[in-house]
Image (cartoon, rainbow, N blue to C red):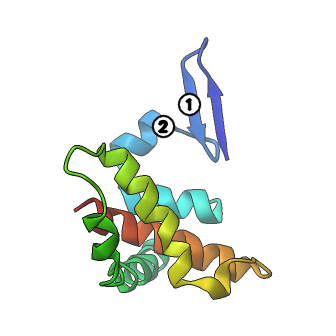
Amino acid sequence: ITYIDGDQGILRHRGYDIKDLAGKSDFLEVAYLLIYGELPNNKQYNDFTKKVAHHALVNERLHYLFQTFCSSSHPMAIMLAAVGSLSAFYPDLLNFFKEADYELTAIRMIAKIPTIAA
């Protein structure tokens, strides 16, 4: 999925140079590329954006997890715990049996992490 050659200064996602992606694509286009292996056309992008938006909300009980951390906790430690806890809300996807399960889990993660960070 990603090719890195630090000595040569090369970083590619699915064959695309990261500089080109950073200059011409947005976050969701690159996420689509990483999941599906190609950049989306307009319809694919619009459909993907709707799927991500549909899954952006997090369960309201997640706020109880945030209350357990002391105020000096490092933000990345809190993020790690919150993202890890998401699997408790979707136990049906703990074992992947279909490609669609991977897709749904990836879309949920892409959608929910900005909400958690906020």
Q: Secondary structure at mark 2?
A: helix
Give me the disc on residue 18: 2
Q: Earlier in the sequence, mark 1 or mark 2?
A: 1
Instruction: Say if residue 40 shows up in the picture.
Output: no
Comparing 70 with 3, the one in front is 70
Q: Which quadrant holds residue 13?
A: top right
Tell me residue 34's x, y (percent): 58, 57
- Are the residues flagged by discs 1 and 2 in contact, CB closer than 8 Å? yes
> What residue appears at the point 46 percent right and 77 percent down from the top-left corner?
48
Comparing 94 with 12, the one in front is 94
Q: Is residue 55 left or right of residue 13?
A: left
Q: How many marks?
A: 2
Tell me residue 110's x, y (percent): 44, 66
Tell me residue 116's x, y (percent): 31, 65
Give, as a three-letter code, the residue at label 2.
Answer: Ile
Judging by the rendered image, the residue that carries numbered circle 1 is 11
